[in-house]
Amino acid sequence: TGGATGDCAALELGPDIYAFERRSGNARFTVVLNFAGESRTVSRTGRVVLSSAVAREPGSSLMPSAELLPYEGVILSHS
């Protein structure tokens, strides 16, 4: 059996946005979810690991902010 290690912290990035940061060792990831039916701009930097938007390429960067599409979810790496 395994267990989760590291820290997790909620982030305030705006209305209709749920976001949290996960840290473990040297790894740091941010998960950002747009629950709005319209685009939202979030101020967060990082490299895209995974996105629910087909047009957002893995490995692309969000600097210093990005517009998330309606109902888009994105995982960012900060390592």
Image (cartoon, grey):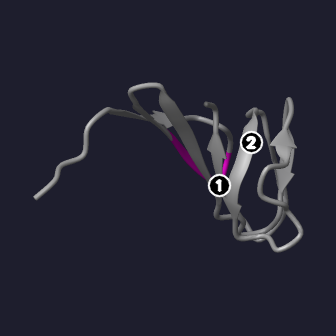
Q: Is residue 56 above or below residue 11?
A: below
Q: Is residue 12 left or right of residue 7?
A: right
What is the residue that sits farthest to the left in this orientation? 1
- The image shows residue 43 at horizontal and vertical percentages of 77, 33
Magenta range is 15-20
Q: Distance from label 1 to label 2 (Cα)?
A: 22 Å
How crowded pointer 2 is (Cα within 10 Å; few <14, some 14-19, many 20+) is rated as many
Q: Nearer the viewer, residue 74 or 68?
A: 74
Q: Is residue 52 magenta?
A: no
The overriding secondary structure of the stretch rendered in magenta is strand
> Pointer 1 and pointer 2: residues touching (CB < 8 Å)?
no
Residue at the image point whose x is 63% and y is 40% from the top = 77
Secondary structure of the residue carrying tag 2 is strand
The residue pinned by badge 1 equals 16
Q: Is residue 64 left or right of residue 32?
A: right
Q: Is residue 73 visible from the viewing direction of this image? A: no
Q: Quadrant of the C terminus?
A: top right
